[in-house]
């Protein structure tokens, strides 16, 4: 079987673990896959995508800042892409470009399967109201939590997401509400940091009491997650976790979409943690 090329497009991509993850998946499954990463400027993005597939590429992962653009140029968008307004996975089928978003599935798999956290019936606080939150809202709501609150520096942006996903929350019998970060209340079972402050290593402007007794998760991984998770642990969090598992799990979904084979994500997570 000939080797098929896959890649990550974004800017920046220098520190991405995606090539390592997919190389490990290929080794597990004996799939003939080679995976690379490429820094792509926005003005060149669509042409680079077309060129990649014209040259026989099998599939692309897309990271920031091109996820919205990836959704826009696709001929077909999954429901996950339509709801998220962004895509992180592209592939060709019958000459048509298909877009998928595996971020939310990756987060839910990490919370449920790797960490053993319960979502159904739980009260969840999401910190931030940007693309990262929009991309995971529907998969979280589908797990039927009691409530999801979106806390953001500007409440209007959080309220926009509440209005956009209100029908989905009703469908899944969950309460969905918005607040400012400063007004975030206590009593949550899970607190997930997806704020822009977290990307810069700053602590979101919430009271320590908000994380006391909660399970706290940061959607970034490694050193980027350390400030929030250390602060949460010192503030009484029940347990803390970074987003490495989410990264590997969303990659596993993409690998399955491309190859039709389920890799063993948990083994790869353990190996990457051992290499850190």
Image (cartoon, rainbow, N blue to C red):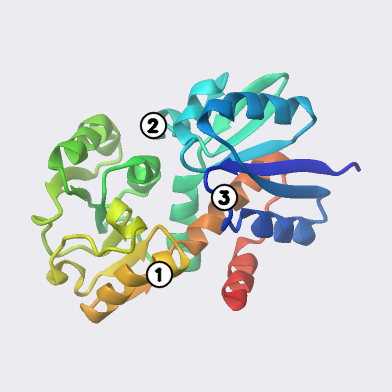
How far apart are the two marked residues, 2 and 3, measured between alpha carbons? 25 Å
Which mark's residue is nearer the viewer, 2 or 3?
Answer: 3
Q: Quadrant of residue 18?
A: bottom right
In the displayed orientation, state which residue is furthest to the left. Answer: 183
**In terms of sequence position, does the residue under pointer 1 or pointer 2 come before the other?**
2
How far apart are the two marked residues, 3 and 1, measured between alpha carbons? 23 Å
In x, y percent, where is residue 70?
Answer: 52, 30
What residue is drawn where x is 72% and y is 61%?
A: 24
Q: Quadrant of residue 227?
A: bottom left
Q: Evaluate if marks 2 and 3 touch, with contact meaning CB atoms under 8 Å apart.
A: no
What residue is drawn where x is 12% and y is 64%?
A: 186
Q: Nearer the viewer, residue 247 or 139?
A: 247
**In terms of sequence position, does the residue under pointer 2 or pointer 3 come before the other?**
3
In x, y percent, where is residue 245?
Answer: 51, 62
Circle 1 sits on which residue?
A: 241
Which label is found at residue 204? none
Instruction: Classify mark 1: helix, strand or loop.
Output: strand
Q: Is residue 221 above or below residue 153?
A: below
Q: Quadrant of the C terminus?
A: bottom right
Dot 3: few (<14), some (14–19), or many (≥20) neighbours within 10 Å? some
Which label is found at residue 13? 3
In x, y percent, where is residue 28?
Answer: 76, 61
What residue is drawn where x is 39% and y is 31%?
A: 83
What residue is drawn where x is 21% and y is 69%?
A: 211
In this orientation, does residue 78 appear?
Answer: no
Circle 2 sits on which residue?
A: 83
How far apart are the two marked residues, 1 and 2, measured between alpha carbons? 26 Å
In x, y percent, where is residue 151?
Answer: 19, 50
Q: Nearer the viewer, residue 273 or 149?
A: 273
Dot 2: few (<14), some (14–19), or many (≥20) neighbours within 10 Å? some
């Amino acid at each position: 079987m000939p080797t098929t090329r896959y890649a990550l497009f974004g800017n920046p991509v220098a520190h991405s673990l995606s090539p390592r993850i997919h190389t490990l998946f290929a080794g597990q499954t004996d799939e003939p896959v080679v995976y690379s990463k490429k820094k792509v400027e926005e003005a060149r993005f669509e042409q680079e995508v077309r060129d990649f597939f014209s040259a026989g590429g099998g599939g692309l992962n897309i990271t920031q800042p091109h996820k919205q653009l990836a959704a826009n140029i696709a001929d077909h968008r999954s429901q996950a892409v339509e709801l998220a307004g962004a895509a992180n996975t592209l592939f060709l089928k019958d000459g048509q470009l298909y877009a998928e978003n595996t971020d939310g599935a990756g987060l839910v798999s990490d919370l449920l399967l790797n960490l053993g956290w319960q979502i159904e019936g739980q009260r969840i606080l999401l910190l931030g109201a940007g693309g990262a939150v929009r991309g995971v809202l529907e998969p979280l709501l589908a797990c039927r939590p009691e409530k999801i609150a979106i806390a953001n520096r500007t409440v209007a942006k959080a309220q926009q997401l509440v209005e956009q996903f209100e029908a989905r929350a009703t469908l899944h019998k969950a309460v969905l509400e918005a607040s400012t970060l400063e007004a975030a209340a206590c009593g949550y079972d899970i607190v997930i940091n997806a704020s822009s402050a977290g990307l810069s290593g700053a602590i979101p402007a919430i009271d320590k009491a908000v994380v006391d007794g909660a399970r706290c998760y940061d959607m970034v991984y490694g050193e980027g997650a350390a400030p929030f998770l250390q602060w949460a642990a010192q503030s009484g969090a029940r347990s803390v976790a970074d987003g490495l598992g989410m990264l590997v799990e969303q990659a596993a979904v993409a690998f399955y979409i491309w190859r039709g084979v389920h890799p063993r994500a948990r083994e790869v997570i353990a190996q990457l943690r051992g290499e850190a």
